[in-house]
């Protein structure tokens, strides 16, 4: 038997454990996992290397169509490829039009087609006035829906109050779908912001004061209650607090279908970095204090967090720069897709003893399950797509601006010392990135969920 591609002699992190074995790939899929050597048309020497499944990033904003000058499918997906993210799930907002209608879904698919280096799936949106479009979007192949409980940063993607939120949950339950929620209280954040602004505050610390932990916790509490009443699965996005992890864990223990993600930046930056770096580290929810970051890491290590995403949300340089002396004026969003896997290798595996199998669950397997893309994506197993990372686990390196593929190279992680270098990235058996550089043309494909994605417990 001769394979199209063989990855020879690596340490594979599979769903069944960590094994030293050879991988045979044909037709873009893993068709052999063998102890004995295999022969292939293309031989990849992976001795002394760890092989991970490519990351599945559930939370990215490529802003295309409509705001491609902020990022776009080309630059965003090249950044993904270079950083070891082989599947992205693009959020319904910041693009124009937002994906709240079937026509907008088609426009997004047209924008991505032929442009994406990595495979992609899409979220639909729930806003104040699009409830009649939910069924069409579900049929159209979105993996799930996203709603904001507080003002989003764009006018066209309206946040929803409890009336629409609860009715949306009921409708999505009927459709067999689930809702992902940006959980911050609009009432608390708006009141705080108005008062801080009225008192003349424009400094960096004011951003965090306007969005305190209670604002996030109150919203999590409320969405858990509403979703339980509606019997609709929910997914809490970019959750930043250990107390939130506790509430969600308790709900799940009580039988509720709820999943939760946190982001690489909450695990690798604190509010002190916002003060130090300024607008480049502005995001919502805001970066938290070091004690809370420690608590969040404990939740990750204990298995109370399901997955880690980038919430990659780039913008033009001017949109950050205008907030240098007025934090309210800066775009809130962190450019982070390319550094997601490296940060988790460094901060998780090397600094905090996160096991490789847990790393894979957090970055690949569980997000693929939540999005309804597993078992095709998210795991090294027979029959799965050969989306693979060849990693030199102990190699130290530094994040340099020149390495970044985003349209605007602004990242709070520039100059960061890292351990664990992604030497090669394969998408369906093709090498798309080698030694940090993108080496292929765009061949990314649209992924429809095998079943509707769901926020339910891992299965
Ligand atoms: Zn986001």
Image: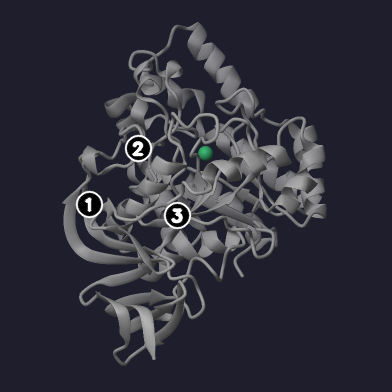
Instruction: Say which element carries label 2.
Output: loop
Q: Tell me if I can see residue 228 in this picture.
A: yes
Q: Residues within 10 Å of mark 3 (few under 14, many from 20)?
A: many
Image marks 3 and 2: residues in contact by CB distance under 8 Å: no
Query: In the displayed structure, would residue 218 be above or below residue 451?
Result: above
Q: Earlier in the sequence, mark 1 or mark 3?
A: 3
Q: Which mark is residue 191?
A: none
Instruction: Say which element carries label 1.
Output: strand
The CA span between labels 1 and 2 is 18 Å
Q: Position of residue 415 (x, y in %)?
A: 20, 40
Residue matched to label 3: 118
Q: Which mark is residue 270?
A: 2
Q: Position of residue 279 (x, y in %)?
A: 36, 25
The CA span between labels 1 and 3 is 24 Å
Instruction: Say which element carries label 3.
Output: loop
Q: Earlier in the sequence, mark 3 or mark 2?
A: 3
Establish whether ligand 1 lies closer than 8 Å to the Cβ of label 3.
no
Query: In the displayed structure, would residue 68 be above or below residue 168?
Result: above
Is residue 159 shown left or right of residue 360? Answer: right
Would you identify the image quadrant in which residue 132 lies? top right
The CA span between labels 3 and 2 is 30 Å
Query: In the displayed structure, would residue 17 be above or below residue 81?
Result: below
Residue matched to label 1: 418
Establish whether ligand 1 lies closer than 8 Å to the Cβ of label 1.
no
Q: Residue visible at 21% across and 41% down?
A: 400
Of residues 139 and 157, the one nearer the viewer is 139
Q: Residue visible at 44% across and 67% down?
A: 428
Q: Residue visible at 44% across and 29% down?
A: 69
């Amino acid at each position: 038997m001769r394979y199209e591609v063989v990855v020879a002699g690596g340490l594979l992190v599979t769903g069944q454990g960590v094994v030293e074995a050879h991988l045979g790939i044909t037709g873009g899929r893993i068709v052999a996992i063998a102890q004995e050597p295999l022969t292939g048309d293309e031989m990849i020497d992976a001795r002394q290397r760890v092989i991970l499944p490519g990351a599945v990033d559930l939370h990215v904003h490529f802003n295309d169509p409509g705001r491609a000058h902020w990022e776009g499918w080309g630059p965003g997906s090249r950044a993904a490829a270079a950083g070891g993210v082989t599947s992205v799930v693009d959020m319904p907002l910041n693009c124009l039009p937002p994906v709240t209608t079937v026509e907008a879904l088609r426009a997004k698919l047209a924008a991505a087609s032929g442009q994406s280096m990595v495979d992609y799936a899409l979220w639909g949106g729930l806003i104040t006035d699009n409830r009649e479009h939910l069924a069409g979007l579900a049929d159209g192949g979105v993996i799930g829906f996203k709603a904001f409980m507080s003002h989003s940063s764009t006018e066209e993607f309206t946040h929803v109050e409890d009336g629409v939120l609860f009715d949306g949950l009921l409708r999505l339950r009927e459709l067999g779908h689930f809702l992902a929620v940006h959980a911050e209280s609009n009432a608390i954040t708006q009141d705080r912001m108005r008062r801080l602004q009225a008192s003349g505050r424009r400094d960096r610390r004011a951003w965090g004061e306007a969005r305190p932990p209670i604002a996030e916790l109150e919203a999590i509490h409320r969405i858990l209650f509403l979703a339980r009443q509606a019997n609709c699965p929910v997914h809490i996005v970019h959750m930043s607090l250990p107390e939130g992890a506790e509430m969600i864990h308790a709900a799940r223990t009580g039988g509720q279908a709820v999943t939760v993600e946190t982001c690489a930046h909450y695990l690798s930056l604190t509010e002190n970095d916002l003060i130090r770096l300024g607008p480049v580290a502005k995001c919502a929810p805001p970066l938290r204090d070091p004690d809370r970051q420690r608590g969040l890491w404990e939740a990750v290590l204990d298995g109370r967090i399901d997955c880690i995403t980038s919430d990659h949300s780039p913008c033009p340089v001017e949109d950050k720069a205008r907030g240098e002396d007025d934090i309210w004026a800066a775009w809130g969003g962190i450019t982070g897709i390319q550094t997601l896997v490296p940060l988790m290798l460094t901060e998780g595996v090397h600094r905090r003893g996160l096991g490789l199998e847990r790393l894979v669950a957090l970055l690949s397997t569980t997000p693929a399950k939540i999005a309804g893309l597993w078992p095709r994506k998210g795991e090294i197993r027979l029959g799965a797509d050969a989306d693979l990372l060849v990693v030199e686990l102990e190699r130290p390196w530094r994040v340099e601006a020149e390495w970044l593929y985003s349209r605007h190279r602004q990242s709070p992680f520039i100059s960061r010392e890292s351990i664990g270098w992604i030497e090669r990235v394969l998408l369906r058996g093709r090498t798309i990135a080698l030694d940090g550089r993108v080496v292929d043309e765009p061949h990314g494909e649209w992924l429809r969920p095998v079943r509707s994605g769901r926020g339910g417990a891992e299965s």
